[in-house]
């Protein structure tokens, strides 16, 4: 395949699971403006599909993503207005769609995961990486800082000190260091990344979907700090009368596997 093959974001469904694939052959899955829009649209559709219980995000051809496609910068980020539009109207909505996806999202990370690729992975709930995966945000060599809405995910995982080290040094580093910084859930053998990501998604899908969604909402809310409102408490306890809650208790007492419906 040649370098001029257009990038795409592909959606594949299998039962309660979905796979979102970043595909830009010949460019290490560098993410074009069109792909950022597609990523937002794909996750918007996923969010509306109550039958889906878990999503796996991956890259095609042995790499996750090599960041934004810099070849587009002279046009898309040609001046101050273009820079703002690119980061606030293109990247930010796509990352927000991933972060706000009600279903749990697993990042299947192989090969290169830098720049915008790391920003996407940071918005996922679990990150499973191969031993030889590479990480970093070397944009200091491009002469610009990380935009606010893009920094949120990295800060939430690594904290301020590690985020600054990643951005100020601009190094590309390995999976072991990424895990030490809090960027990864676990590291597996390169040959096992896809299988382990699938197994993680299957484990999530076997759990109660309503509970998973509440855990996502509550963890995000608690991370923002401040006292919960009465409405927020009621949202949390809304599971109490659900069919899945009753099924989980029934199955446990009966010594059998629960069959959750999502209700």
Image: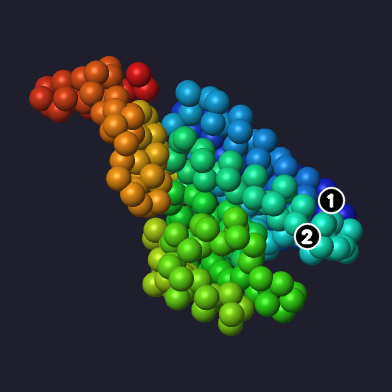
Q: Residues within 10 Å of mark 1 (few under 14, many from 20)?
A: few
Residue 67: mark in rendering: none
**Sequence-first tag of 2 and 1:** 1
For disc 2, the neighbor class at 10 Å (few under 14, some 14 to 19, many from 20) is: some
The C terminus sits in image quarter: top left
Badge nearest the viewer, 2 or 1: 2
Horizontally, residue 1 falls left or right of residue 58, namely right
Q: Is residue 94 above or below residue 146?
A: above
Which residue is denoted by mark 1 in the rendering?
5
Residue at x 52%, y 51% (from the top left corner): 123
**Could you tell me how far apart the alpha carbons at marks 2 and 1 are, in whole angstroms?**
25 Å
Q: Where does residue 52 sit, x and y in percent of width and height?
A: 48, 28
Location of residue 116 (image quadrant): bottom right
Residue 143: x and y in percent read 74, 76
Q: Residue at x 12, y 22 (%)?
A: 254
Asked which quadrant contains residue 142, the reply is: bottom right
**Looking at the picture, does residue 211 appear above or below residue 99?**
above
Q: Are marks 2 and 1 in contact (CB under 8 Å)?
A: no
Q: Residue furthest bottom?
A: 169
Task: Choose between 89 and 105: the one closer to the eye.
Answer: 89
Q: Is residue 135 above or below residue 150?
A: below
Left/right placement of residue 38 relative to residue 43 reads right
Left or right: 179 in relation to 234: right
Quickly name the residue at label 2.
83
Tell me which residue sits at (50%, 71%) in the image: 163
Q: Secondary structure at mark 1?
A: loop
Helix, strand or loop status at disc 2: helix
Q: Position of residue 202 (x, y in %)?
A: 40, 38
| In this rendering, position of residue 61 left or right of residue 221 | right
Q: Quadrant of the N terminus?
A: bottom right
Which colour assignment does the render follow? rainbow
> Which residue shows up at 47% across the image and 35% down it?
102
């Amino acid at each position: 395949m040649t370098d001029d093959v257009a990038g795409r974001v592909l959606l594949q469904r299998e039962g309660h699971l979905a796979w979102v694939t970043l595909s830009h052959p010949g460019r290490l899955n560098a993410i074009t403006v069109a792909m950022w829009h597609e990523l937002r649209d794909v996750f918007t559709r996923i969010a509306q599909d109550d039958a889906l219980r878990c999503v796996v995000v991956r890259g095609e051809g042995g790499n996750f993503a090599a960041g934004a496609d810099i070849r587009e910068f002279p046009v898309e980020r040609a001046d101050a207005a273009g820079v703002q539009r690119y980061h606030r109207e293109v990247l930010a909505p796509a990352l927000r769609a991933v972060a706000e996806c009600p279903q749990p999202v697993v990042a299947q990370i192989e090969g290169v995961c830098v720049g915008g690729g790391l920003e996407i992975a940071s918005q996922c709930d679990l990150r499973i990486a191969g031993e030889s995966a590479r990480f970093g945000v070397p944009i200091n060599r491009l002469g610009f800082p990380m935009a606010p809405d893009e920094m949120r995910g990295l800060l939430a995982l690594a904290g301020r000190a590690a985020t600054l080290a990643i951005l100020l040094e601009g190094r590309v580093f390995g999976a072991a260091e990424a895990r030490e910084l809090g960027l990864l859930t676990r590291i597996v053998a390169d040959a096992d990344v896809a299988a382990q990501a699938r197994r993680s998604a299957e484990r999530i899908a076997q759990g109660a979907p309503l509970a998973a969604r509440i855990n996502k909402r509550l963890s995000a809310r608690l991370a923002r700090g401040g006292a919960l409102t009465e409405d927020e408490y009621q949202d949390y306890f809304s599971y109490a009368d659900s069919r899945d809650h009753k099924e989980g208790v029934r199955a446990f007492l009966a010594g059998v596997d629960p069959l959750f419906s999502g209700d």
